[in-house]
């Protein structure tokens, strides 16, 4: 038996080798050796243009993230009507105050293998900010307007035998975004060389229309170019073992359809993200012409009136967050390690879903969500035909919306993680009959391109959408905020469920606490920070607890997407008009990825496998002795007792008297005295089950370096994120430390970036020096391609760290 299996396996491997050795497809990432310059160069597309003095960069690249911050960049005197503003004021940090506006050029020599007659060469760009115009050997070969979408161009006919010159022009208009959009070739650029007889780009569609315990029917539609072809599809399990093999019976026109049974299927879910791979091989006679690998999951999604959302037959609610696309100090340049770190932090919180607000997600983020287990709401637009900002997407809506949706769906449809599309966010077109027509038109395009997933819109004008029919026509009515309208909307809308497509928008700054502790909206302070007691929000929004009540008490609410998982560059509400605020306060974690207290509030509900017990505020309040300093505990336990320097301050138990009392344990009248604050969690019999404490820190004694990963890949891209903090001689964190620190990286890597999460900091992310904010910051170290040890040293005025060693492995 064992021998048979071995022989079978050897045949399989030989067969795969044969296929790969003769197949005609090559995919190359165009990541290195680009020349770049900002500016207007009328002849830069010409091969003869001299770019020797331009910077050499690698792609993905964000030209604006190096700064410097400048309040004049994209300064806007405007009233943000969406935020209920009626008077125009000067907005300085709305798009991050980084130099993204203007024109930029990228040039690259293409060293291609010899292209045989009947081969095709495609250039695929996963997103370029913005309005990419692509030139090959001086000739315009393709263009796209929307900076967030994927598109490809067949460049075969414009290629010369050698010395090909690719040039890409980009342009960002001022007032074109409501957040930091980034600038440049910020996502990957691919070159695909394949046979003329092959699978079309994005030409494979895998769905799983029937799922039973014993088998799943996998339906694969494949679009092909070429005559007399044969299509063979293998399905591999997650270990690469073949579980099914099928030859397409016939090819009608240019499409083959296969229905393949997978027995005893492993289903995909956030808890068990099992993936299969379909290997499609195209033959002409016995000669393989093309091989395409498509990863997919077997899972069933359903949205039912009265029951809500179910995955694989089990009803569940989305525990989701909205994310903008920037990666904090790295800007918008896509980096898989940075995306993976974000998702790791969110997973630990118990989050199971992401909304790519308000645009197409990167392919890398979708791949990670497939692998790590996150459901995905893939959004498309922040504007339709009516403007939010002067140069926003409304400029292109009429001409481009359909092809933008087609590319979104076609490029991403096989991702198991995507469970819903969104055609828009808070579009002003929610008002008026034209908007209803647009909503219907867009939804029908999604349905035509993908009949398997429903469509939502994040609606903030709920009253208007109730009256006009806008909300009733959506597959999924999504409400942004407006907790007071959920009941009414659910009565008016026919779907039988409501999604919290955007929730909370609570604001806070990591480690900053304001007194007295009172709930309220639009609170502002002289230091332009918001309080981490998590009771501050905006005129249109609310605190997390208000959403929890709806999620817990209303079976027809199908989940929420919190605004936002991480702070992002731009939109510094409530300090939109206060320089130097230049990044958001909405994040559950800060811009550096460091969890704020709110992280533990969500974790206490969402992480059902590990307990949460978290105390706030910090306990370093010299000068506040004897003053009222409330203590909150975010915990998965029902009750707890608080002790200050050994003295009990009483037991608190969650109750339903107010949303806060239901979800937080609060001791409102604690008088500050230095020492140790301890919380002891109690079980239902009042027995202690867990404890947590914080102690007033003494003098700073030591710098501590904590990397998220000690071993990274020597691929020139991988990153280690090192949290830097200061402790006293007993190891107590100095929460209020703000020392200026310097960073030195040597060995097989380099200093990449630094961020402290302070939304008002104007220090560069790319210079190896920064102040601690609330006692912490994060240094990002990048591996080179050589491999070996990387050393990080951190020095302050009085303190110095032990060197940290990270290893980059080949
Ligand atoms: C919403 C909007 C988001 C963001 C948020 C801030 O209305 O959809 O993009 O602006 O408000 O609270």
Image (cartoon, rainbow, N blue to C red):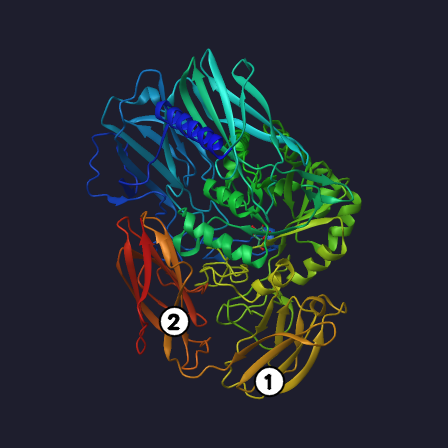
Residue at left offset 66%, top offset 53%: 481
Q: What residue does disc 1 label?
A: 644
Q: What residue does disc 2 label?
A: 704
How far is the residue under mark 1 from the one under mark 2? 27 Å
Q: Tell me how many marks there are.
A: 2
Q: Position of residue 72 (x, y in %)?
A: 39, 56
Query: As rendered, which of 48 and 656 lies closer to the eye?
Result: 656
Q: Position of residue 442 (x, y in %)?
A: 61, 32
Query: As rendered, which of 601 and 25 lies closer to the eye?
Result: 25
Tag 2 secondary structure: strand
Residue at left offset 27%, top offset 35%: 108
Query: As rendered, which of 143 and 277 lies closer to the eye?
Result: 277
Q: Is residue 740 left or right of residue 548?
A: left
Q: Tags 1 and 2 in contact by the CB under 8 Å rule?
A: no
Asked if 20 appears above or below 181 in the picture, the reply is above
Tag 1 secondary structure: strand
Q: Position of residue 297 (x, y in %)?
A: 57, 37
Find residue 174 and name its label.
none
Asked if 595 appears above or below 285 in the picture, the reply is below
């Amino acid at each position: 038996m064992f021998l048979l299996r071995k022989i079978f396996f050897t045949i399989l491997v030989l067969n795969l080798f044969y296929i790969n050795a003769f197949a005609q497809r090559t995919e190359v990432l165009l990541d290195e050796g680009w020349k770049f310059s900002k500016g207007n160069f009328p002849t830069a597309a010409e091969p003869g243009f001299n770019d020797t003095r331009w910077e050499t960069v690698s792609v993905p690249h964000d030209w604006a993230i190096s700064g410097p911050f400048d309040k004049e960049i994209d300064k806007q005197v405007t009233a943000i009507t969406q935020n209920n503003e009626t008077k125009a004021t000067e907005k300085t940090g709305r798009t991050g105050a980084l130099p993204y506006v203007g024109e930029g050029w990228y040039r690259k020599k293409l060293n291609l293998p010899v292209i045989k007659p009947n081969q095709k060469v495609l250039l695929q760009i996963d997103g370029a900010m913005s309005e990419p115009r692509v030139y090959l050997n001086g000739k315009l070969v393709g263009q796209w307007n929307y900076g967030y979408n994927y598109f490809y161009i067949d460049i075969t006919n414009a290629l010369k035998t050698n010395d090909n010159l690719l040039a890409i022009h980009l342009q960002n208009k001022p007032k074109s975004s409501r957040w930091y959009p980034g600038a440049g070739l910020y996502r990957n650029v691919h070159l695909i060389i394949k046979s003329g007889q092959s699978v079309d780009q994005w030409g494979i569609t895998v769905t799983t229309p029937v799922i039973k315990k014993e088998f799943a029917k996998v339906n694969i539609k494949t679009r092909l170019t070429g005559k007399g072809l044969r299509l063979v599809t293998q399905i591999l399990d997650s270990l690469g073992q073949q579980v099914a093999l099928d030859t397409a019976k016939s090819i009608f026109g240019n499409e083959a359809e296969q229905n393949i049974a997978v027995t005893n299927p492993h289903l995909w879910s956030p808890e068990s993200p099992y993936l299969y791979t379909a290997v499609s091989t195209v033959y002409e006679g016995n000669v393989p012409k093309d091989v395409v690998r498509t990863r997919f999951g077997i899972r069933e999604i359903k949205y039912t009136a009265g029951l809500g959302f179910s995955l694989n037959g089990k009803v569940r609610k989305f525990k989701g967050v909205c994310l903008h696309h920037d990666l904090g100090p790295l800007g918008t340049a896509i980096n898989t390690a940075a995306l993976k770190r974000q998702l790791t932090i969110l997973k630990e919180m118990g989050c199971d879903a992401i909304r790519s607000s308000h645009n197409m997600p990167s392919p890398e983020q979708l791949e990670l969500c497939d692998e790590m287990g996150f459901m995905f709401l893939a959004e498309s637009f922040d504007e339709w035909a009516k403007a939010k900002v002067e140069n926003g997407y409304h400029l292109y809506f009429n001409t481009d919306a359909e092809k933008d949706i087609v590319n979104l769906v076609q490029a991403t449809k096989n991702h198991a993680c995507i469970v819903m599309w969104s055609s828009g966010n808070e579009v002003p077109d929610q008002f008026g009959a034209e908007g209803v027509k647009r909503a219907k038109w867009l939804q029908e395009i999604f349905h035509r391109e993908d009949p398997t997933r429903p469509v939502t819109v994040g609606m903030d004008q709920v009253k208007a959408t109730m009256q006009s029919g806008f909300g009733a026509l959506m597959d999924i009515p999504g409400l942004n905020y407006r907790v007071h309208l959920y009941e009414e909307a659910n009565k008016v809308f026919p779907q039988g469920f409501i999604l919290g497509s955007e929730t909370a928008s609570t604001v806070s700054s990591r480690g900053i606490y304001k007194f007295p502790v009172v709930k309220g909206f639009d609170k502002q302070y002289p230091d332009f920070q918001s309080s981490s007691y998590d009771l501050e929000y905006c005129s249109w929004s609310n605190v997390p607890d208000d959403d929890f009540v709806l999620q817990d008490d209303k079976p027809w609410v199908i989940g929420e997407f919190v605004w936002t998982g991480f702070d992002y560059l731009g939109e510094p509400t409530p300090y939109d008009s206060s320089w130097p605020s230049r990044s958001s306060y909405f994040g559950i974690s800060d811009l550096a990825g460091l969890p704020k207290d709110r992280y533990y509030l969500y974790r206490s509900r969402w992480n059902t496998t590990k307990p949460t017990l978290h105390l706030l505020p910090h306990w370093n309040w010299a000068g506040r002795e004897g003053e009222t300093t409330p203590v909150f505990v975010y915990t998965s336990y029902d009750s707890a007792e608080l002790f200050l320097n050994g003295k009990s301050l009483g037991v608190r138990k969650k109750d339903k008297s107010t949303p806060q009392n239901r979800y937080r344990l609060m001791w409102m009248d604690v008088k500050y005295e230095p020492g140790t604050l301890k919380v002891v969690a109690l079980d239902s019999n009042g027995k202690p089950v867990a404890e947590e404490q914080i102690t007033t820190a003494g003098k700073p004694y030591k710098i501590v370096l904590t990397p998220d990963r000690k071993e990274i890949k020597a691929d020139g891209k991988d990153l280690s994120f090192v949290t830097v903090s200061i402790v006293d001689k007993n190891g107590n964190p100095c929460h209020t430390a703000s020392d200026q620190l310097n960073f030195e990286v040597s060995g097989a890597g380099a200093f990449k970036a630094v961020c402290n999460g302070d939304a008002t900091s104007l220090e560069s992310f790319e210079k190896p020096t920064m102040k601690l904010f609330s006692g912490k910051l994060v240094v990002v170290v990048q591996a080179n391609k050589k491999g070996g040890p990387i050393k990080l040293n951190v020095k302050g005025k009085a303190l110095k760290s032990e060197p940290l060693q990270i290893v980059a492995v080949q």
